[in-house]
Image: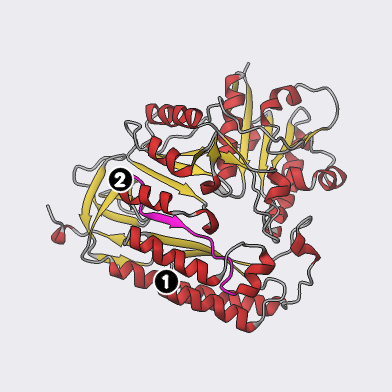
Amino acid sequence: MKKRFYIETYGCQMNTCDSEILAGILMQHDHLQVNLPEEADVILLNTCSVREHAEQKIHSRLGELKQLKDVKPGLKLGIVGCMAQNLKQDILKGKPYVDMILGPDSYRQIMEHLDAKQEHVIDTRLSKFEVYDGLFPARKEGINAWISIMRGCDKFCSYCIVPYTRGRERSRSIAGIIEEAKQAVDQGFVEITLLGQNVNSYEHEGRRFHLLLEALCKVDGIKRIRYTSPHPQDVDDDLLRIHADYKPLIANHIHLPLQAGSDTVLKAMNRSYTRAHYLDLVEKIRRFVPDMGMTTDIIVGFPGERDADYRDTLDVMERVKFDSAFTFKYSPRPHTKAAGMPDDVPEEEKSSRLTELILLQKEHTRYNYRKLVGKEVEILVESESKRHPEEMKGRTSCNKIVVFPRENYLPRSLARRTITDTKGITLFSRPEQHNA
């Protein structure tokens, strides 16, 4: 009888991709994936350590799963991913019922570890070489396939734990990435999203990120290519030319983490660019691709952030007017340089700044969405609308959701529609103003 496994994923898209890799390995070894932990012989929590809140959620979930393990003694419970790498001893000390702890570079060995006879298995060795080339993820049905093109990070931002949980940068071969993309197309996926901690730092045997993008543009069956997340330092003219030359196959969207708008804070964060450099880069991007959608990440309350520094961040937001922003209050992460800095911004001040920043971003989001009313856009059709089965939904090249009449549109097809209305973060194309 096949053993059954269940994977629960927390955190970023990279973890989603890693969970698909783990599922692929287990299925190749005659395991069956199930949708409920109660049905499983093996439960894996793929974890995140980027923020303290994510770790708290996982600790709480482990407490719930202990009850299941108490009534099902043969059940194996594993913690994998960044939290496993970061807090392995704490997990074993506080949660001795956890059977297996695997870091992000140890997934090839999962079958060996599941078969191990010892009470606890810990494998959190960081690799200089592991990129999981030659392994094909088990993806759930959809239109978008995540493809990891590199692992690790060499930037060492002072607040970020990723270099300590995922190791140093190393890139996959272009041939291996192309092979995986072709397999994804054969499985019905038409949109490819390339993943990397700093995806545009990609380099393999002297071939850089823009050449990988160009090679993927020549793969038959791909209708849209996205990537996340780039680092502002590594966005160069070669990348922007590829965007312009292969538009709209390469999506008109870039996620460009700002983190802070103050040079003082950026330096303390070790972000390797200044406010002026960031604003110049935004201007250059818009010269190459005038309709480029832009999103970002921002942290408030970093150690030493004065009110004037915070106001500098708001000023950059006013100048750029991002489509959306992932916004966070700073929380110290162990092993990082910032963890040794005084966490001197009061919690209530962090909350106040975050609230104000979110309200400003909502204004900018509404502004950018309203600008699209009356314009024709290309939409990659995703699925039937959840609320109204007579309508379909899809995304623009700039990564905005559009709802429009079903008519004869099918998922995975491209549609050209005129935007007639906007509500919240959804665009609408009403039939009476549709350009046939």
Q: Quadrant of residue 431?
A: bottom left
Per the rendered image, the range of residues in magenta is 246-262
Q: Is residue 51 above or below residue 277?
A: above
Q: How far is mark 2 from mark 1, CA to CA?
A: 27 Å
- Please tell me whether residue 19 belongs to the stretch shown in magenta: no
**x%, y% of residue 72?**
75, 31
Inspect this view and state whether residue 35 appears. Answer: no
Which amino acid type is marked by label 2? Val
Q: Is residue 313 above or below residue 33?
A: below
Asked if marks 2 and 1 touch (Cβ < 8 Å), the reply is no
Q: Quadrant of residue 196?
A: top right
Question: What is the number of the mark on residue 373?
Answer: none
Q: Is residue 33 left or right of residue 432?
A: right
Question: What is the number of the mark on residue 381?
Answer: 2
**x%, y% of residue 386?**
36, 50
- Please tell me whether residue 248 belongs to the stretch shown in magenta: yes
The residue shown at (67%, 65%) is 269
Q: Quadrant of residue 222?
A: top left
Which amino acid type is marked by label 1? Lys
Q: Is residue 91 above or below residue 27?
A: below
Q: Is residue 147 above or below residue 379?
A: above
The residue shown at (33%, 52%) is 397
- Give the quadrant of the N terminus: top right
Q: Which is closer to the viewer, label 2 or label 1?
A: 1
Question: What is the number of the mark on residue 321?
Answer: 1
Q: Main secondary structure of the magenta part?
A: loop
Q: Is residue 427 left or right of residue 100?
A: left
**x%, y% of residue 168?**
68, 43
**x%, y% of residue 415?**
23, 47
